[in-house]
Image (spheres, helix red, strand yellow):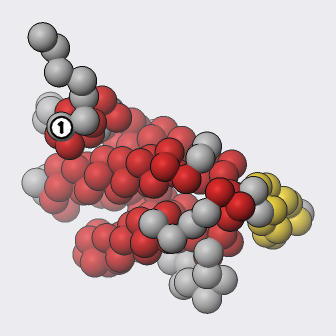
Amino acid sequence: MNVDEVRRHIRYSGWASRRLMDAARQLSPEDRDRPTGISHESIAGTLSHIHFADRIWYSRLVDPEEPVLVKVDFATLEKSWPQIQQKWETWANTISEADLDRVIIYKNPDATHSTIASHVVLHLINHATLHRGQVMGMIRQLGVRPPATDFMFHLRELGESPKVS
C-alpha cells in the first residue's frame, strides 16, 4: 500500500462503519443487543469489537497513550467511535511512504509480535470489513435491509467512479 491507498481505505472504512452505525441506531436496543450466535454475540457487541480493534491498532501504530476500550455499550460507542475514526484519518493525512515501512512491535497476551505499518493498516481495514459484513447479516436476520457499505458504493458516493458514456 502506498500513502494515497492508505488514506483512501481509512476514509472508506470510517465511511462504511458510520453507515452501519446509522443503521444500528434505527434498531431497538433489544434488537441491537440480541444474542445471534454470530461473531461477537450481537450487533452491538460486534460493532464494539470493530471499535476496539480501531483503538488498539491506533495505540500500537500511532499513539501508545490512546485509551483502549475493550467492550463498550452502544451510547459510548456512538460517542467514542467517530473520535477514533477521525484520529485515523488525521494520522493518514500526515504520513509519508517511509512511515508505512516502519516496523511495529506489540504484545498480545500470548507473545510479542512485529508487523510493518502498511500491513497493520491492511489488517485494520480487512478486519473491519469482515465484522461489518457479519453485522449486516445480523441486521438482515431481523428483516431489515442494511445499508450498502461496499467500497464501490463509497466511490460512487464520492463521485470517483469513471463516467459511462
Q: Residue furthest right?
A: 111
Residue 75 image-quadrant placement: bottom left
Q: What residue sits 50% from the left and 45% below the top?
A: 5
Residue at image coords 61%, 63%: 96
Q: Where is residue 90 in the image (x, y as percent from the top left)?
A: 43, 72
Please state if 147 lies on the left or on the right of 132 as rendered.
Answer: left
- Above or below, 95 against 13 in this view is below
**Residue at the outermost top position:** 165
Residue type highlighted by circle 1: Gly
Please tell me whether residue 43 is drawn above or below residue 105 in the rendered image.
Answer: above
Residue 132 visible at all: yes
- The residue closer to the viewer here, 59 or 46, is 59
Where residue 147 appears, as percent x and y from the top left, is 19, 38
| In the foreground, 68 or 137 | 68
Residue 113 relative to residue 161: left or right? right
Among the 4 quarters of the image, the one containing residue 70: bottom right
| Picture residue at 88% right of the left edge, 65% below the top | 112
The one nearer the camera, 67 or 1, is 1
Quarter of the image for the C terminus: give it: top left
Q: Nearer the viewer, residue 100 or 31?
A: 100
Looking at the rendered structure, the secondary structure element under dot 1 is: loop
* Direction bottom: furthest residue: 65
Where's residue 132, x and y in %? Answer: 38, 43
- Whether residue 139 is visible: no
- Which residue is label 1 attached to? 159
Side of 61 where 23 appears, left or right: left
